[in-house]
């Protein structure tokens, strides 16, 4: 996996979306976008967006993602990148 490869990032995004869908069945329409972290060539930044369905209520949700290639660590939550600040 290369953080600079668009194909690898698309594959990672699709894999994360499938895993999230399996892990949390209340999340629908899961979409994950991944891009290379401009400040760290061994890391990728991403965002997971979905619709959270509880009974008849649908609520949009999003979660910033940060993954480091060297350590394999993945963080879900606040991102320090301005690209995902909004």
Image (cartoon, helix red, strand yellow):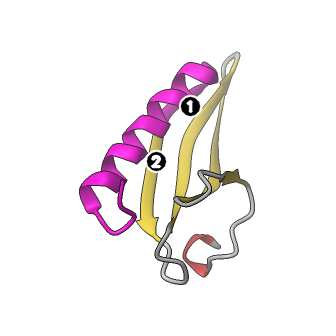
Q: Which mark is residue 62?
A: none
Look at the image and tell me whether residue 76 can be seen: yes
In the orientation shown, which residue stands out farthest toward the front? 70
Name the side, left or right, on which 12 lies relative to 85.
Answer: left
Residue at x 55% of width, y 48% of height: 48
Crowding around mark 1 (Cα neighbors within 10 Å: few <14, some 14 to 19, many 20+) is: some
Q: Position of residue 20 (x, y in %)?
A: 56, 31
Q: Position of residue 49 (x, y in %)?
A: 54, 47
In the picture shown, does residue 16 fall above or below 27?
below
Crowding around mark 2 (Cα neighbors within 10 Å: few <14, some 14 to 19, many 20+) is: many
Q: Nearer the viewer, residue 69 or 83?
A: 69
**Mark 1 touches mark 2? (CB < 8 Å):** yes
The residue wearing badge 1 is 20
Please report the bounds of the magenta region as a residue range: 1-30
In the picture shown, does residue 1 fall above or below 16?
below
Q: Nearer the viewer, residue 31 or 3?
A: 3
In the picture shown, does residue 16 fall above or below 66?
above
The quarter of the picture where residue 66 lies is bottom right
Residue at x 42% of width, y 36% of height: 15
Magenta span: predominant SS is helix
Instruction: Check disc 1 and report its element: helix, strand or loop.
Output: helix
Q: Does the magenta-highlighted stretch encompass residue 2?
A: yes
The residue wearing badge 2 is 32
């Amino acid at each position: 996996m290369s953080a600079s490869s668009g194909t690898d990032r698309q594959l990672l995004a699709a894999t994360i979306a499938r895993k999230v869908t399996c892990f949390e069945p209340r999340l629908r329409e899961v979409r994950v976008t991944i891009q290379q972290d401009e400040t760290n060539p061994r890391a990728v930044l991403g965002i997971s967006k979905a619709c959270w369905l509880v009974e008849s209520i649908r609520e949009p949700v999003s979660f910033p993602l940060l993954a480091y290639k060297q350590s394999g660590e993945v963080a879900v939550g606040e991102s320090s990148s301005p690209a995902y600040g909004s």
